Amino acid sequence: MAKAARPKPLQGEPLIIQMGPQHPSTHGVLRVELETDGEIVSKATPHIGYLHRCKEKIGEKIPYEQYVPYSDRMDYLAAINTNWTWAMAVEKLAGIEVPARAEWIRVFVGELNRIASHLVFQGCFGLDLGAITPFLHCFREREMVLDILEELSGGRLCFNYMRIGGVAGDMTPRAMQMTQDFLTQFRSKLDSLNELLSFNQIFIRRSANIGVVTADEAIAYGWTGPILRASGVDWDLRRDEPYSIYDQFEFDVPVGQGLKGQVGDNWDRYWVRVQEMYQSMRILEQVIVGFPEGGEFKAKVPAVIRPPQGAEVYVRGECPRGEVAFYIISDGSGTPYRMKVRGPSFCNISALEAIAKDMVVADLVSTLGTFDLVMGEVDR
Amino acid sequence: MDHNEIYDLLKMTFGPERILENCKTGDEKKGYRDSFILIAKDALPEVCQFLRNDERLRFNLLHCISGVEWPEYFESVYHLFSLPCKHRVTLKVRVEKTEPRVPSVTGLWPAANWLERETYDMVGIVYDGHPSLTRILLPEEWEGHPLRKEYEMPDHEHLREIGF
């Protein structure tokens, strides 16, 4: 009797899904080309460039001081920090001294903006995992920070507050008072957010042990900022190569410890940012206590800045997303010969293809969330 | 180590034919800014491997790759940092305009993958040995390299053809 032929196993073809460019979980116009085998991602290729606005070409055409609002629109969730790095780069290039009072104001607004940016991350990451309430709490707190920054700069998203040689406006007693009020209640709000989200069992199960990136991988892919520290690398520009007046403040650098899973997993990347908000509060408290009386808030700067011919600088600043850097070459005229922006998210996201392999689609969404991407700065 | 010590160490290891010059930028009157080390194009992979692996240097973080167009040549600029040793160095490679080809360093630092693609896209320097050197910020059909000095915007006809 002939043996019955065994049925062939079912052959599934890999399914290609375009995630984005208009997808809520990609946090902007990012397109990820997913090759999936059922629920498992076998390949994820990010495609960028949807928000490319030729920032570097524009930089070659306009005077140094006019570039400040353009730097706002790169990392629009942390506009002040990008502004600040641009201002530092031009100041170093042209040899401009910044008055002490301006440095204090810069640290003040920089740390406030860091809190605002991390709050957006915290809320959105909860949202990526299906937690809607924390998102509303985070945005309520962020609103208070934005009110303070509005009091100083007039803007609420793109502040255009830094100037070459200082800041656009002086500190006001009202802004100081608002910050004090904010700090007195924010710590307990953050504690309750932790109870609601960070130590929630569902949240931990969805984020711990997922998307693990080792320290060596993180460095090899050029990661910087909170997601580098989450992988266990103890490196913070503000402490290790202090710029501005960061050497005068006491603060700790939170590093991923794998409290709920492994070092460098999604939960660590989340937790490092939450702890950074506590540290930013510590810095803000010290700024309020030590804020200098009187003094200039902007140095006298020539109407047209002409750095020495052939001079070039590479200046880095610690942004909420990592180290943003400006590389400027001067030809002695009023505009740069060449300027290059190094966006931290650009380097961070280049690792996605390597870590997304063999991940479940739902986990890819949350891993992408922990990168805290701002596409304005990836595409520039 | 500071920039000059790194230059001396490299020159001692690779010789003056491959490590060409230690250049200061800026001028005497207004002050000097960042320095850079100019190296021969063909020596780039060996020098980078040495910079990354040597115990005294340990440049593990490739921070940025930039392309610069000068009237006579293109430059590929590497900003390297060492997290364990806390020092930095800037390397430059010059290539002639007729054939702008530079060896890729993607094998040493995976971060170079996207940075080299961006430089290729914007300035048009070709990185030999790159796993997939395609445009990254602009569409694949785009013509020209926008950060070159003589670049002109394509006309509307062409933009419509490629779907803009």
Image: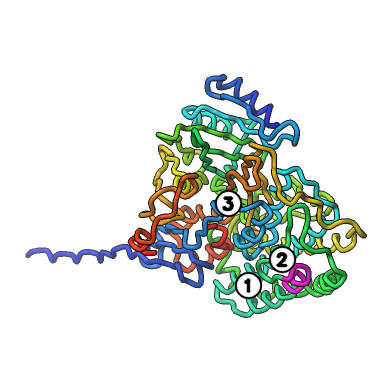
Q: Is label 1 in a helix, a strand or a loop?
A: helix
**Residue type, label 3:** Lys
Residue A343 location, x and y as percent? 58, 53
Residue displayed at 52% across by 37% down: B70
Mark-to-mark CA distance, 1 and 3: 38 Å
- What are the residue bounds of the magenta stretch? A146-154
Dot 2 corresponds to which residue? Answer: A115
**Residue type, label 2:** Ile
Residue A74 location, x and y as percent? 60, 60
Mark-to-mark CA distance, 1 and 2: 12 Å
Along the viewing direction, whichever of A16 and B23 lies nearer the viewer: B23
Instruction: From this view, report whether residue A174 is shown above or below residue A262.
Output: below
Q: Is label 2 in a helix, a strand or a loop?
A: helix
Residue B73 location, x and y as percent? 49, 34
The image quadrant that residue A294 belongs to is bottom right
Mark number displayed over residue A256: none
Q: Is disc 2 surrounded by few (<14), some (14 to 19) or many (20+) residues within 10 Å?
A: many
Dot 3 corresponds to which residue? Answer: A61
Q: Chain of mark 3?
A: A
Mark-to-mark CA distance, 2 and 3: 34 Å
Instruction: From this view, report whether residue A334 is shown above or below residue A148.
Output: above
Q: Are marks 1 and 3 on the same chain?
A: yes
Residue A186 location, x and y as percent? 78, 72
Residue displayed at 45% across by 48% down: B151
Residue B141 left/right relative to A255: left
Along the viewing direction, whichever of A200 and B144 lies nearer the viewer: B144
Dot 1 corresponds to which residue? Answer: A123
Residue at the extreme right: A293
Q: Is disc 3 surrounded by few (<14), some (14 to 19) or many (20+) residues within 10 Å?
A: some
